[in-house]
Amino acid sequence: TRSSFNEIRNNTFNLLTNYSTGVGFRSIYGIYNNTLTENTLIVSGNISYGFNLINSSNNIISGNNITVSGVSSFAIYDTDSRNSSAYYNTFYLTGTSSRAIYAYRDKNFTIRNNNITATGSSAIPLYIYYSNSSSIYNNSVSVSGSGAYGIYLYRSEYNSVTQNNLNISGNNPDGIYNYNSLFGNFIDRNTIFISGSSNAGIYFSDSYSGSASNNIINANASSSSSYGLYFVRSYNSNVSSNDVRIMSISGYSLYLSRVQNLTIENNNLTCKNSYAV
């Protein structure tokens, strides 16, 4: 509690029991300028936390190797924080409903250059919840669990999701999901590869403004019911300069349902055995 300017480096944390925490910072007075680097964490317990930071700012989480096999457990759980960064971390998510980075009510969180592999069902590597003005870029995300998402933005505004590489396979996982966001999130220059079935590269639902532009989305021939760009109940958004190739058995390059005031321009939409729009 009330700990600042500390460096936690090169430790091994093995969390075997439920409701465990590897490193936790929490204080009503604020926590800031801590560095968590080059640690190894194994999170086996259910509802457990590798790093748990609450009411903190200007912290750095870098170069850590974190495996999460527990159910509903988190590698990094960051709440009510400002101006912190997570970069060059490696995550393995095998647990059901596990998370690599969960940001709740954060602002200006930078998430970059992380490598994430998620095989657990309903896993969400990057979950941005009620968080604003964050930058998510240059991350490599591989998702194969059923019902999983690569990057999930929920009721979060003015976030930038750029230049990430996502590999989406299995049944029902989606690449980038933007849900119930009142003001714009900007999804730009991401590369998304889809295989499996009932997948979407970029999914906008119940969202206002924002944009999906300059993204590259490919679905291979072995996939089925694939969607490149999927917009439902979305308004005042911009969809431009995307390159979408859907070679799956069925699907859409661009799917629109109950949308209003969308600007759709300069996209390259290619499909085989499916629909362009």
Image (cartoon, grey):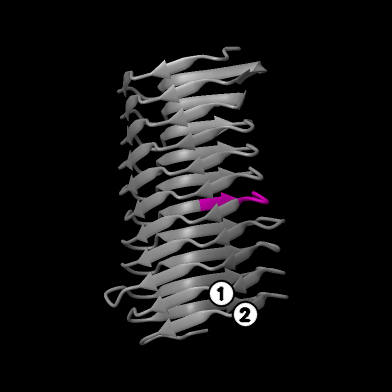
Disc 2 marks a residue whose amino acid type is Glu
Q: Is residue 267 above or below residue 81?
A: below
Q: Main secondary structure of the magenta part?
A: loop
Q: Position of residue 236 (x, y in %)?
A: 72, 69
Q: Residue at x 53, y 77 (%)?
A: 255
Span highlighted in magenta in the image? 152-159
The quadrant where residue 14 appears: top left
* Residue position marked by numbered label 2 in the rendering: 265
Q: Does the magenta-highlighted stretch encompass residue 158?
A: yes
Q: Does the magenta-highlighted stretch encompass residue 257?
A: no
User: Which quarter of the image is occupied by the N terminus?
Assistant: top right
The quadrant where residue 248 appears: bottom left
The quadrant where residue 222 appears: bottom left
Tag 1 and tag 2, C-beta contact below 8 Å: yes
Distance from Cα at disc 1 to Cα at disc 2:
7 Å
Q: Mark number for residue 121?
A: none
Q: Is residue 59 left or right of residue 62?
A: right
Q: Earlier in the sequence, mark 1 or mark 2?
A: 1
Q: Position of residue 221 (x, y in %)?
A: 29, 78
**Label 2: how many Cα within 10 Å (few below 14, some 14–19, many 20+):** few
* Residue position marked by numbered label 1 in the rendering: 241
Q: Residue at x 37, y 25 (%)?
A: 18
| SS under mark 2 | strand
Q: Residue at x 33, y 53 (%)?
A: 145
